[in-house]
Image (tube, rainbow, N blue to C red):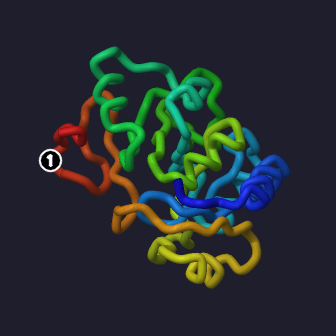
Amino acid sequence: MIPLPRWRLSQAVRHLRRGGVIAYPTEGVFGLGCDPCREGAVAEILELKGRPAAKGMILIAADFDQLLPFVSVPPAAVLARILASWPGPVTWILPAAPRVPAWLTGGRSTLACRVTDHPVAARLCRAFGRPLVSTSANPTGRPPARSLLQVRRYFGRRVLMIPGPLGRLEGPTPIYDALTGCCLRGGSQSGGNPTT
C-alpha cells in the first residue's frame, strides 16, 4: 500500500465531514472529491470546475457495498461483468437508487460509479466510510491535473491536497454503460466488454 500518513488521512476525513473539497490521486489523473451527500460541497466542485450540474458526477468507492445506497443492483449477468472489472480503473453507468439527489445524477436515472484500485483513493473511501465524488481536477476545457503543482495552479488553496502517485492510466478512466456494455469515454470505442 502506498504510504499515507495517518495524520494526513485524518485531516482529509475531517475536511470532508465539514463539507470541504479535496484533491487526491486516482488511476490516471488527480481528482476533486467531496462528500456526495452534501449538496453544498458538490456545488463547490461545480463552481471550481465551471462544470454544468446537468453532467452529473462520478462516485468512487473502496468496495461495492459502499455503493449500494446509491445504485440499484442490475441483473446478475450485468453485475458479474461489472464486478469482474472491479476493483479497477473502469467506471460504469449504473441505474441510480431511488431518491439519489439530482446533484449527483444530473437529473438522470443513472449514476457513474467505480470501485477504485488506487490505494490512496480506496483508503480515503474506507476512512471516510462512504464513497467520494470523483471528477478530474481541472477547470472545464483545461487538461486534467497530473501533479499537485498543476492542481495548485488551477485552484490555489481552495482545495485540500492529498499527495500520492497516480495509477497506470494516462488520463481519466474509461466509462461504460452497464446495461449495454457500450463505451462512452476512452477505452475501446467498439463497445466491447472491458473485462476481456
Give me the residue at 62% from left, 84% from top.
153
Are there few (<14), some (14-19), or many (20+) residues within 10 Å of tag 1?
Answer: few
Can you give x and y, in whole percent of width and height, for residue 134 in the image?
Answer: 56, 53
Give me the residue at 74% from left, 55% from top.
6
Residue 168 is left or right of residue 57, and the answer is left
Can you give x and y, in whole percent of width and height, for residue 105 in the image?
Answer: 55, 39
Q: Nearer the viewer, residue 64 or 172?
A: 64
Can you give x and y, in whole percent of width and height, for residue 183 in the image?
Answer: 26, 46
Give me the residue at 67% from left, 76% from top.
155
Q: Quadrant of residue 61?
A: top right
Instruction: Identify residue for label 1.
Output: 190
Q: Nearer the viewer, residue 43 or 59?
A: 59
Residue 190 is left or right of residue 132, and the answer is left
Q: Nearer the viewer, residue 115 or 136?
A: 115
Q: Outermost residue, top direction? A: 76
Vertically, is 41 above or below 111? below
Vertically, is 151 above or below 110? below
Can you give x and y, in whole percent of width and height, for residue 102 in the image?
Answer: 62, 38
Q: Secondary structure at mark 1?
A: loop
